[in-house]
Amino acid sequence: MANKLWEKDFEVNSEIERFTVGRDRELDLYLAPFDVMGSMAHITMLQSIGLLSADELKVLLAELKRIYADCVEGRFSIEEGVEDVHSEVELLLTRKLGDVGKKIHSGRSRNDQVLLDLKLFIRNRLHITATLIKNLFDELIAKSEQFKDVLMPGYTHLQVAMPSSFGLWFGAYAESLADDMLFVQAAYRMANRNPLGSAAGYGSSFPLNRQLTTDLLGFDSMNYNVVYAQMGRGKTERNVAFALASVAGTLAKLAFDACLFNCQNFGFIHLPKECTTGSSIMPHKKNPDVFELIRGKSNKLQGLPQQITLIMNNLPTGYFRDLQVIKEVFLPAFDELDDCLRMSAYIINRMEVNEHILDNRMYDPMFSVEEVNRLTAAGMPFRDAYRKVGLEIEHGTFKADRHLHHTHEGSIGNLCNDKIAAYMEQLMAGFHFERVEEAERRLVQ
């Protein structure tokens, strides 16, 4: 029995096969449950247009549901010599059901099949990622509220600048994640369009009912133009990669701040000893390796859109094997980002805050702008007030007034965390995850 869907009466050179298959057998395990789900929708549609009988559909669906359970529970594998997940599923069906297993590919190409698999995979993984972003967001908002009245220095040029607070610091990263979620939602909505029925990129002479598979799989709509559906390969991954990179950028900056603020020279935050690592030579060391790895992994993820762009750059219309290489950098990226999100939420929850930073008088100059503003409000021209306070600092006579009165939206005294939280809730509701979950549940159960 042929182990390749395209195999005829000759064998491919073993070195050519090794090189062209690449890591597909390994990476296609990410796609396996979605490939099976897509086949369920496709054969249901085939039966509706008369290419399968009701009895054939019944036995095929029963066997596909068994294979789907194997995928979900980690029992599915792609055998040696089998090219990809599509070939393995069809091989398993044919072994069990005979010739009826060979009928599932009518009106379909591996091109639109892998497009569908990727979109279903992306949709699933962005749901997980969005949930993890929201978990980290909640931890940051909670910390912002808990320490909203604890002041800390704000910096420009790594010089002490103006008063800030832990409420502002934690809340800033929460709001950054909310804006990142806009990218994630846009990527999700672009991925949530059905390419199935585009076949090799030019449609099919079978009277396919593309709206039926769109509805069965819970897509918002289909990619209507069959050529564009194929042009979406690579573009979809790149757009999603930009969303992942946006989240990674927030994590990298947060991790850098945490590393800086945790060092003894700052001492603004403290990590519990069980969340640090040691040195093989220096017995006193408690290293923030968790934040350093989050920073490193997140910085690597920020290069993902460029990697995908360079792989797909200048390809003309149609399918090319170059696109296979995108899987190698794209599919594992979700695991890496999700791990960073989980660990960030875990460590933020356990982070301790120094509530006595300003006991050190070296931070007094950061209240200089407060004094300039106080004098200006009392009637002194701003430039005169600026000069007066500047000279006092130079002469060592400046006395800091640490009583702050910031009232405008988003300031120390008015964080607007409730508004930021409402913004995030609105974004989460805009995904409509429940519609997709219900469609998938109906299909596979």
Image: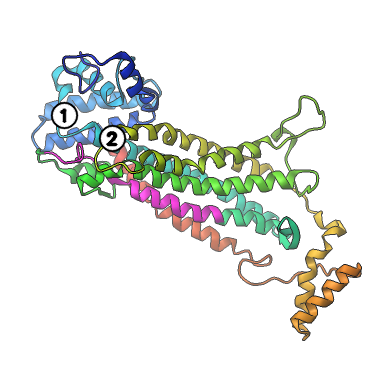
Q: Which mark is residue 412?
A: none
* Of residues 46 and 369, the one drawn nearer to the viewer in this rendering: 369
Q: Quadrant of residue 390?
A: bottom right
* Amino acid type of the residue tagged 1 in the rendering: Leu
Q: Secondary structure at mark 1?
A: helix
Residue 24's spot in the image, x, y percent?
36, 25
Q: Residues within 10 Å of mark 2 (few under 14, many from 20)?
A: few
* Nearer the camera: disc 2 or disc 1: 2
Q: Which residue is mark 2?
A: 320
Q: Which residue is mark 1?
A: 57
Q: Residue lying furthest bottom in this view?
A: 379
Instruction: Judge from the rendering whether residue 142 lies leftward or rightward of residue 323; answer left or right.
Output: right
Image label count: 2
Residue name at image x 81 percent, y 28 percent:
282
Residue name at image x 38 percent, y 47 percent:
433
Range of the magenta residues? 176-204
Q: Quadrant of the N terminus?
A: top left
Looking at the image, is 234 positioned above or below residue 58?
below
**Sequence-first tag of 2 and 1:** 1
Looking at the image, is 115 positioned above or below residue 186?
above
Residue name at image x 38 percent, y 20 percent:
75
* Amino acid type of the residue tagged 2 in the rendering: Phe
* Of residues 12 and 238, the one drawn nearer to the viewer in this rendering: 12
Instruction: Judge from the rendering whether residue 33 lies leftward or rightward of residue 351; answer left or right.
Output: left
Looking at the image, is 277 positioned above or below residue 88?
below
Residue 428's spot in the image, x, y percent?
44, 53
* Of residues 400 and 110, the one drawn nearer to the viewer in this rendering: 110
Q: Residue lying furthest front in this view?
A: 314
Residue 29's spot in the image, x, y percent?
38, 26
Q: Is residue 185 magenta?
A: yes
